[in-house]
Image: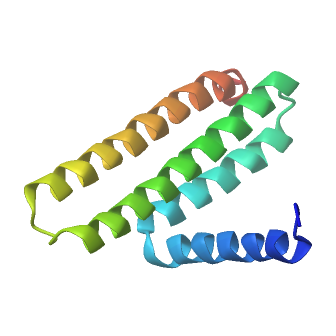
């Protein structure tokens, strides 16, 4: 069979478990979710242009996706090599840097978009 509805819906359950795990175990993911909700509220409070809304949604998804990827790589690298191994530390640091750069970039773009509404 080319397509299995059962497996399709099961994959949503798998994904939801991953999101719940990250929310429960990763403080940064909780902070990012809180920030995303605040941005969503502001998006609908102020009359943003459609492209601004789309850009903000994409940035939210990008930051959350990067954090989930970071969590997955951290957990996987802990399985492969002892925690104190130099290469594992470098991998974790690089992934943390990727999340940081994505988050800071999203914050800068968000401030550029929201600034005119904040100063009014």
Residue furthest to the front: 1
- Nearer the observer, 94 or 101: 94
Quick check: 19 left or right of 107? right
x, y percentage for residue 47? Answer: 87, 30
Quadrant of the rendered image containing residue 114: top right
Drawn side of residue 90 relative to residue 51, left or right: left
Residue shown at 76% from the left, 70% from the top = 12
Q: Which residue is painted at 60% across and 60% down in the image?
A: 34
Query: In the rendering, at what x and y percent does residue 112 appear?
Result: 60, 22
- Residue sitting at x 67%, y 30%: 118
Q: Report the colour scheme.
A: rainbow
Q: Nearer the viewer, residue 97 or 46?
A: 97
Q: Do we see residue 85 in this rendering? A: yes
* Quadrant the C terminus occupies: top right
**90 or 114, which lies in front?**
90
Residue 49 appears in view: no
Q: How many marks on residues?
A: 0
Against 50, residue 41 (above or below) is below
Nearer-the-camera pick, 58 or 3: 3
Which x, y percent locates residue 28?
Answer: 44, 61
Question: Which quadrant, please, contains the N terminus?
Answer: bottom right
Residue at 68% x, 45% y: name it.
Answer: 39
Q: Quadrant of residue 37?
A: bottom right
């Amino acid at each position: 069979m080319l397509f299995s509805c059962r497996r399709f819906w099961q994959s949503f359950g798998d994904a939801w478990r991953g999101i719940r795990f990250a929310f429960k175990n990763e403080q940064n993911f909780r902070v990012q979710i809180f920030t995303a909700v605040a941005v969503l509220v502001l998006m609908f409070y102020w009359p943003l242009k459609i492209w601004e809304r789309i850009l903000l949604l994409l940035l939210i998804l990008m930051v959350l996706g990067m954090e989930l990827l970071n969590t997955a790589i951290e957990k996987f690298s802990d399985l492969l090599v002892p925690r104190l191994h130099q290469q594992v530390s470098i991998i974790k640091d690089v992934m943390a840097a990727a999340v940081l750069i994505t988050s800071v970039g999203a914050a800068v773009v968000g401030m550029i978009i929201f600034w005119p509404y904040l100063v009014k």
